[in-house]
Structure formats: C-alpha cells, structure tokens
Image (spheres, rainbow, N blue to C red):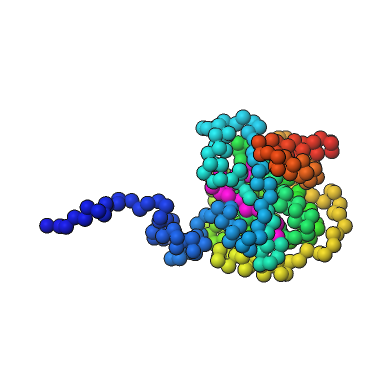
Amino acid sequence: MPVRLPFRPRRDAYPPDLWTKCPGCSEMLFNKQLDKTMRVCPHCSHHFRISARTRIEQLIDAGTFVERDADLQPVDSLGFVDSKPYADRLVAAQLSTGLRDAAIWGIGQLDGRRVSICAMDFWFMGGSMGSVVGEKIARAGEAALAERIPLIIVSSSGGARMQEGTYSLMQLAKTMGVVERIKAARIPYISILTDPTTGGTFASFAVVGDVNIAEPNALIRFAGDRVSAGTIGEELPPGYARAEFWVSHGFVDRIVPRAKLRDEIATLLSFLVAPATALEPPPPTGFSPRSFLSALTGALTGEGSGSMGQTANGAPGASTNGNGSLNGNGTSNGTGESSGDGSGAANQGEASRG
Ligand SMILES: [Zn+2]
C-alpha cells in the first residue's frame, strides 16, 4: 500500500514566481539562479528580456545612477480608444511596472566614466515610443551634448506608440535631430539593440550609433515579415530579422553577450572620446532624414521629407526650451501636464520657424 504524505500537497504547476521555462531549450530555470546569470539561460544562452531598471543596474556602476525626469508622464491627448481606452492602458502599465512610461534616463558612471544613458522597458506597453519616451531620449542626448559625455541608448521596443498617433511619429524626427547634433559635436553615441528593436525605434535613433551593438539573437527589424516582403516585392531570407543577419550585412557592428556588454562598452568608450572643447556649430541645413519611415510619412501626408526635416530642426531647440519649464513642472507635481508641455513646445518651435 503506497504511503501518503498528507503534509506535502501535490503541485501540478510550478509557482510562476519561482521558475521560468526557457523558450530556447525548454529547461525549467530557477529564477534566483537566472538572476545571477543576468537573466541569460545557462544551457542555451537565451537572452531573456529585462526591465529598464535591471539593465541600468547591469551597466552602470552601483550607486552612481541619478535618474532624471522620473515624473514625466504621458497624456492621452487624442482620447484614443482601441479595444481599451489609452488612459486605462497607461494606468495598467504604470501599476504593473512601477514606471511612468517606457523609458528611464539619467546620468551615471560606467566603469568610472560619466555617461548619459536611456534604457527602454519592453514591459511598459511593448516599449512603444510615445511623446514621453521620445522626450527622454532627446533629453538624454541633450545632456550628453551639454556635458560632453557619451550617450548610451538601450532599445527594447515594438515601435511607435499608435495610441499617440502623429505625436509618436514626431518622436522619430525629434530623437534623430538630437542624434545629428551629437554626431556633429563628435560626442560618442553607443546604441544597444536588444530583443526586440523594431518599428519606429529601428527607423530612427537605434541604428545610427557610432557603434551599434546587439544582444545575441535579438529581433531587429522595421516591420513584420509580410509587410516587409510586400514593400520590397520579394521574399526575405530566413533569419533576416535576427541580430546575426544584421551583423553579417554590416548593419550592426557586433554581437555582445550580456555578461560582456558592460566591459565592451567600457572598452569602446576608452577609444571614443569627445573633443575637449565644443566644435563649431554645424550648418543648420545639414540634417535631412531619409529613413523609409520618414519617406512613408511624407507619402501618407502628401508632403515631402522637407517638412520632416523642418520639424526635426525645430524639435531639438524646442526640447531645450521645454527643459527648464518641464523640470520645474516635474519637481512641483507630476499631474501629466508635462508631456503636453513638451509637445506644445515642439509645436511652438515649428510654428515660430514657419
Ligand atoms: Zn535555454
């Protein structure tokens, strides 16, 4: 007769907070162990997605990170409703992640070197880039420019945030405007592409770093397979959307496993050094984004890419203007006016220009 142990109840399922099943090799991984290996599977080296905060902890020297603009939060300026109201989605994402939006930026030290860093968080609405994410990336860039320190952006994003409509597409031009100024000033910019880096992120700042580093097997692409194949009118090669393909075609510079990422960036930053003094300002006509998304926007709105360029040129100045007022806002309260101010300022910049 089998002996029954009444004090040990049978469990049909593993408690979800204790174990994680690896999608790469189907091993059950003990979460505490997984945290020790930086959330990389010890069996098949599958790189799990990690939060923006964990990413910053992994890259930045302990105790040196000072977050900026933590209070900046999105507003539902369009009153957008798909299967759920955007406002409800925001609240749900804020509760589940503890973030105001899908990016964190601040200043910290990486191997003793002061850097401006912005990390995106896929767990907040798929890391989608709305006005706040774009603003944080732009501000990280502005800070890098002002302090003449390297800029590091860690992308983890499904693309533009459709719930913010045109505001989210404007972030492509805004972020690229800052990146262009960083390049003109010869400030080092390292872009880290993690799983996934797609859509508007791919079509703007993520792929124009001085060095583009990807994590192994990261999904990197502009659009889904069917859309991409339909656009170019031919079948895409297998595995085209993975980091390894982009490296073999020179689009991404190197693939670095997570455990070596910090050392790799530190080494790169010992070579990439900003000039000690500011260079001559670049000519204002130097920027003209030709990414296919800006071309697409032009086609959809019936305008040429010239208007995108104008927006981009207006945006960096506007975000500098917005900086002071927004910081003031952030310290007094975080009622959600701030991102409205940001886009308002951008509009003013554009209007005053035109
Ligand atoms: Zn595995």
- Is residue 116 within the magenta segment? yes
Please name the residue shown 65% across and 57% down the image: 65
- Residue 262 in the image: above or below residue 221: below
Report the side of 238 relative to 348 (left or right): left
Report the side of 171 relative to 23 (left or right): right
- Is residue 308 within the magenta segment? no
**Residue 279 horizontal/vertical position (percent):** 85, 59
The part of the image, by quadrant, that contains residue 251 is bottom right
Q: Quadrant of the N terminus?
A: bottom left
Q: Is residue 332 visible?
A: yes
Give the number of marks: 0
Q: Nearer the viewer, residue 198 or 261?
A: 261
Q: Nearer the viewer, residue 154 or 96?
A: 96
Please name the residue shown 85% across and 54% down the image: 282
Residue farthest toward the right in the current orientation of the protein:
280
The part of the image, by quadrant, that contains residue 183 is bottom right
Q: Is residue 176 visible?
A: no
Please name the residue shown 62% across and 48% down the image: 103
Q: Nearer the viewer, residue 56 or 81?
A: 56
Please name the residue shown 63% across and 44% down the image: 129
**Residue 199 horizontal/vertical position (percent):** 61, 47
**Residue 81 horizontal/vertical position (percent):** 57, 30
Q: Which residues are magenta?
A: 115-130
**Residue 327 horizontal/vertical position (percent):** 73, 44
